[in-house]
């Protein structure tokens, strides 16, 4: 409070006038107008009490004190949970009379998802290795192919650690997706070595020749997958932040698998493989049937290509039939039920509704406990999350279930059965997914500057949505009006007495609320400060005359009742005013009762009100709908970029522009299978399905590369084109089928929905399996026919160009010398 220089030193001045105790505060003399004095205790009741209760917490309807621990950004959720569990044990031991119980946690779902992903990864790896053994029936060859997976994954973990990637849902998804691919290159290498050995060559010579023969194809197949996922890693915006670790993890793992296949697999094959008697190359009956069918398709190549085009057209036609969704609903093992009472509801009324809802939830055998956070509009992920001022009309119930393995119904099925019973409670709104997890919802936002028209349009949208069977819980943010006691100053009378509007407002606020916390005086204790709140008796707020007769000071120093300078009336006003880009907005939200987000938006946009909005009102994309559009657009751009990069890689590796188009023919052939499998299994086109389709773009090109690369080499060796194509199919059909079945087997546990959080990963695996099956079956037939057409086109263009570049007569039927390709 100042500075002094008494003596030789300098001193700070501090005025110490705080009361030492509550009794001192009661005895404090107050100066009144006219020079009079009075003790504070004569003017009101001074007591050491608690603030007015605006919040409460209950566990299974028993009162509790709840707190929450949130991790800091960049820390591990699982590690923090372990530390918290250790501290709770210490705290429990130090306070034996207090029971400390963990009510709810997001960590259990994270751990279950991690274990489910690791389990699916191991199962997929084992199935992929089993496929190798079933085809080759050679334990040494199977062992060589099997070690390719750990030797590719372990270095990938080091790179992930170096780049500071966590083992999150995104990176685990990448590893689950890539597990079947890691063995592909090794399968192709080892199968080719075994085939050469069965032709009578020694293992060392077979390994050298097989590795040299297949080298370009293996490099090309790996680089196509890298080319697809590099654009995913560099997507802009929020999607790019999420999927950067995904794209990098896939690309790194695949590059390590290439390194293993090109360096270690031939080395092990040369020194560990042995040729057993009776293992000569012999065609199976299925191979003979395939080769006869292939000859027929090449003879009728235009019909074959027309059939492929028709299949692609049908795939495009059925694409809109598959509903779109952002993320499939996930079984997290707990539900967050938001409860909202009308404006003006008291804490006791909200507690009564919460008790009834808890009793209803406890009737389900799957429910373990129900925690109620009453008077809290949760903004975080747990019971003690930040509130919006402790509004007593809001509550959040956290319903915790048994582990998924111990119950028959999923979280979404339990919510569907509970929802009608909750909505039967009168005077309250209920919505699952109040914490932003588990419950999926659709929201439609209308904006406009005309408040009346916006209100009417929003109410009509809410009414029409409620008429649809999918949106029984549709609710509008614009439909809530709060009861108010409105104080309307009398301008002339207030000006005459020298009373401002701010003074009237301050008088009412301080008397009924005790002023805001920042303006309150503080009572000092050794380790904290307690606010001193001055207000009228809480019971007096129930009397309007008491509020009307509150005294307000005038400019002359005297005080007059509020009613002398203002009029009082009971009215209502908006509970909240929300704006978007400075324009008023109103949002209608509804839970998605078992339908995808895209289908829900389609149904809403078909409503009459959405096609006849007032001129001043328009729809604005927000929430999950906006995120879904942004993600799909980003993935579409990444997919297009990936396809172009794949084509560029093929042009560089094969030294031409036309035959890479033959390889690209496999890409559209995979789309139909992915769409059909998604439709048959009832899965929507979600983000995970889009990821699976992107992976297909890299995988299915592999089949074409193996065929085309061998055919090109045979043509350069002087083999007639048809025989070169038949020989390529004969030699490469088995590794193509083996890698496809291995990849399908690797995806099978995920596609079947095994493990925790399978609902998110399953659409991805289903899309991959469906696309692989159709593209493999069709590319083995279609690609040779397309190759022959492209070869004719290449010859025709070569003759035309050579005619333009040379003078004199030219025989257009003369053979064209084929350029030498790059060394393998």
Image: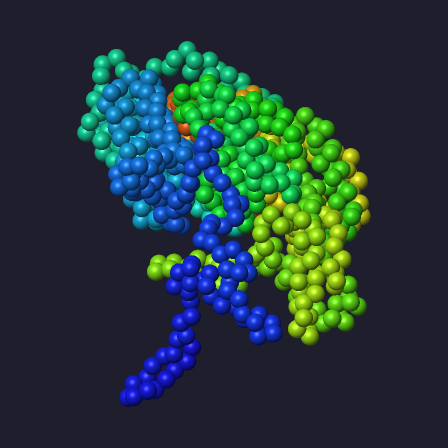
Nearer to us in this view, 593 or 513: 513
What residue is shown at x 73% (from left), y 59% (from top)? 563
- Residue at horizontal 50%, vertical 21%? 363
Residue 700 screen position, x and y as percent: 47, 31
Position of residue 424 measured from the top left corner of the image (x, y, whole percent)? 63, 26
Residue 394 location (% of width, % of height): 57, 40
316 in relation to 17, above or below: above
Q: Residue at x 39, y 82 (%)?
A: 3
Q: Is residue 673 visible?
A: no
Residue 395 in sight here: yes
Residue 124: which quarter of the image? top left
Residue at 35%, 58% (x, y): give it: 527
Q: Nearer the viewer, residue 447 or 90?
A: 90
Of the 4 image quadrants, the one containing the C terminus is top left
Residue 139 lies, with reference to residue 378, above or below; the image says: above
Where is 38 relative to 139, above or below? below
Position of 232 with respect to 459 (left or right) is left
């Amino acid at each position: 409070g100042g500075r002094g220089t008494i003596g030789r030193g300098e001193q700070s001045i501090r005025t110490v006038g705080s009361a030492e105790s509550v009794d001192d505060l009661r005895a404090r003399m107050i100066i009144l107008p006219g020079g009079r004095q009075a003790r504070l205790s004569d003017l009101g009741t001074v007591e050491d009490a608690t603030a007015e209760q605006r919040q409460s917490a209950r566990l299974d309807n028993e009162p509790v004190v709840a707190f929450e621990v949130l991790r800091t950004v960049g820390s591990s959720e699982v590690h923090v949970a372990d530390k918290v569990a250790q501290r709770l044990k210490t705290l429990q031991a130090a306070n034996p009379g207090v029971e400390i119980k963990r009510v709810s946690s997001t960590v259990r779902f994270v751990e279950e998802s991690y274990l489910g992903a690791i389990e699916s990864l191991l199962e997929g790896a084992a199935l992929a290795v089993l496929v190798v053994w079933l085809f080759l029936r050679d334990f040494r060859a199977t062992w060589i192919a099997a070690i390719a997976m750990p030797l590719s994954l372990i270095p990938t973990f080091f790179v992930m650690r170096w780049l500071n990637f966590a083992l999150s849902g995104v990176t685990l998804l990448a590893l689950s997706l890539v597990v079947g691919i890691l063995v592909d290159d090794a399968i192709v290498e080892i199968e080719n070595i075994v085939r050469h050995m069965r032709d009578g060559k020694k293992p060392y010579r077979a390994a050298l020749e097989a590795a040299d023969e297949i080298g370009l194809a293996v490099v090309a197949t790996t680089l196509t997958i890298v080319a697809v996922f590099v654009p995913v890693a560099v997507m802009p915006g929020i999607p790019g932040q999420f999927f950067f670790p995904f794209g990098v993890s896939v690309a790194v793992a695949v590059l390590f698998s290439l390194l293993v296949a090109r360096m270690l697999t031939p080395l092990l094959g040369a020194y560990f493989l042995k040729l057993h008697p009776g293992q000569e190359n012999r065609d199976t009956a299925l191979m003979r049937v395939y080769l006869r069918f292939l000859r027929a398709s090449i003879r009728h190549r235009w019909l074959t290509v027309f059939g492929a085009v028709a299949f692609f057209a049908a795939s495009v036609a059925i694409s809109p039939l598959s509903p779109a969704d952002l993320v499939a609903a996930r079984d997290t093992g707990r539900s967050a039920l938001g409860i909202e009472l009308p404006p003006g509801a008291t804490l006791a009324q909200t507690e009564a509704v919460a008790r009834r809802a808890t009793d209803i939830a406890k009737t389900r055998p799957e429910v373990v406990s129900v925690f109620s956070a009453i008077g809290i509009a949760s903004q975080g992920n747990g019971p003690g999350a930040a509130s919006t001022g402790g509004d007593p009309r809001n509550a959040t119930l956290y319903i915790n279930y048994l582990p998924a393995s111990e119950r028959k119904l999923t979280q979404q099925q339990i919510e569907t059965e509970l929802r009608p019973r909750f909505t039967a409670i009168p005077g309250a709104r209920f919505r699952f997914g109040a914490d932003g997890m588990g419950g999926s919802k659709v929201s439609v936002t209308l904006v406009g500057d005309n408040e009346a028209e916006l209100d009417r349009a929003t109410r009509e949208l809410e009414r029409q949505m409620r008429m649809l069977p999918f949106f029984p819980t549709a609710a509008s943010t614009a439909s809530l009006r709060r009861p108010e006691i409105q104080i309307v100053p009398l301008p002339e009378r207030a000006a005459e007495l020298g009373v401002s509007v701010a003074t009237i407002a301050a008088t009412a606020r301080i008397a009924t609320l005790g002023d805001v916390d920042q303006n309150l005086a503080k009572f000092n204790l050794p380790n904290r400060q307690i606010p001193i709140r001055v207000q009228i008796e809480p019971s007096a707020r129930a009397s309007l005359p008491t509020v009307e007769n509150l005294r307000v000071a005038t400019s002359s120093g005297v005080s007059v009742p509020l009613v002398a300078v203002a009029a009082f009336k009971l009215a209502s006003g908006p509970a909240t005013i929300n704006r978007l880009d400075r324009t008023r907005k109103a949002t209608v939200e509804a839970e998605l009762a078992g339908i995808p987000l895209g289908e829900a938006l389609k149904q809403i946009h078909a409503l009459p009100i959405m096609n006849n909005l007032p001129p001043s009102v328009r729809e604005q994309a927000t929430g999950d709908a906006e995120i879904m559009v942004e993600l799909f657009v980003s993935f579409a751009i990444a997919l297009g970029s990936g396809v172009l990069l794949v084509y560029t890689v093929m042009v560089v590796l094969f030294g031409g522009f036309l035959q890479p188009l033959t390889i690209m023919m496999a890409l559209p052939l995979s789309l139909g299978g992915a769409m059909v499998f998604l439709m048959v299994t009832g899965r929507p086109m979600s983000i995970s399905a889009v990821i699976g389709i992107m992976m297909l773009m890299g995988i299915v090109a592999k089949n074409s590369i193996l065929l085309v690369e061998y055919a090109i080499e045979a043509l350069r060796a002087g083999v007639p084109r048809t025989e070169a194509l038949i020989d390529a199919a004969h030699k490469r059909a088995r590794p193509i089928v083996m890698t496809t079945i291995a990849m399908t087997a690797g995806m099978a546990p995920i596609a079947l929905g095994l493990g925790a959080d399978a609902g998110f990963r399953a659409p991805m695996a289903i899309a991959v399996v469906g696309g692989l099956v159709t593209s493999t079956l069709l590319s083995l037939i279609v690609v040779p026919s397309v190759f022959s057409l492209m070869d004719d086109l290449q010859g025709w263009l070569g003759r035309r160009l050579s005619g333009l570049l040379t003078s004199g007569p030219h025989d257009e039927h003369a053979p064209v010398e084929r350029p030498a390709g790059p060394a393998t």
